Amino acid sequence: MRTYLRILGLIIIGIITPYLLFLSSATLSKDNACVYHQEAYQGVNLSNLSIELEKTGLIGEIHGAVSKEKLYVLSIRDPENFFNFRHFSVIPGNQKAQETLRKVKRHEQVCLKGKLIDNPSRMPHVLGESARVMESWSGLEGYENYEHKASIPQELREQTRGLFKVHAISNQGEILVVEYLDIVIPVFVQEPELTKDLYRGDLVEIDYKIQSYPDNPTHIRLNLQEENPLKVIDKLVSQHGQPKKMSGNLVKFPKSPQLKFDVYAIEVLTQEIPRYYTLVNFEELEEFKKIRLKLSQIWNDNLSTVKRGRNFLVNPKVTIEVQGIINIISPQQANPQILLEDADKIREEK
């Protein structure tokens, strides 16, 4: 575990120093808005963050934004521990804030001013009175805008049971977000006992009801009138530690405020639902460099067929086969990993 975290720390650019260098630049502002007080962010204490939110503005990174659904999530991290963070669901409080949030993109640094609002969900909700983009991100520019395939909530209204992928899980199951096709949907959790053992990436079948409020973004809840309202169809963590030979389209997550360099992955379908396995080597940094070099060469040789995904780039015309050990160490882990011994464990399929 220590080796994993040490090397993963090298991958992530946001750990302490670079993150603070950006945030400290906010203190150069001539007014009192968007001033970063490091002590207020330590431990991501909700009470302290609430004070910052109301007084000078809360500075964080956009974790996700779907303007059509009015779904905006701001991520706040502990300056001394990158892996300790809180997500805030943001509700525009006025027209001006809505116009700003409507244009924000994932990974952009934003200063948000407003207040916490009472909400029965364990996910903190913020009424955003003003928003300022402090640093933009252009990792996906140059490609056609991504068009979502799912039409929500219309498609959900046509049924009462569906297959979903777990997008996020926290607080021992009290906070749950799922994906339906390519749309992210918050779940109002009434019985955490039913969701506490889920992992991000699990495929689950849910008997659900659509929440009557709010209209945007669409929320669902488990239909507790059913005997088994949630059934795990494919538990991702069961793959942990297994040697696997897998193939899929080549995917690239461009470097961002969190990532020190481009990260490559493969798209693997399970019951037509995609999962993204990042390709890494946490034991030998030199081997990891060779792995990334081989993947980047394959990528750069096929640039003409690259497409934009929801928050990544994918080449549907390039399939690679990889062989390694599946690594899943946390329910909140962004993506499962394939630990590759060396670059020879990568083969482009022709």
Image (tube, grey):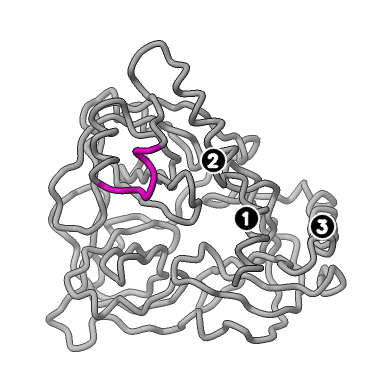
Label 3 vs 1, first from the N-terminus: 1
Q: Which residues are magenta?
A: 39-46
Amino acid residing under circle 3 = Lys
| In this view, 336 is above or below 259 | below
Q: Nearer the viewer, residue 323 or 349?
A: 323
Rounded to the nearest angstrom, the CA distance separating label 3 from label 1 is: 15 Å
Label 2 vs 1, first from the N-terminus: 1
Rounded to the nearest angstrom, the CA distance separating label 3 from label 2 is: 31 Å
Residue located 24% across and 41% down the image: 126
For residue 315, side relative to residue 147 (left or right)? right
Label 3 vs 2, first from the N-terminus: 2
Q: Is residue 14 magenta?
A: no
Q: Quadrant of residue 127?
A: top left
Q: Position of residue 137 (x, y in %)?
A: 56, 35
Q: Which residue is mark 1?
A: 9
Q: Position of residue 163 (x, y in %)?
A: 37, 75
Q: Which residue is mark 3?
A: 289
Dot 1 falls on a residue whose secondary structure is helix
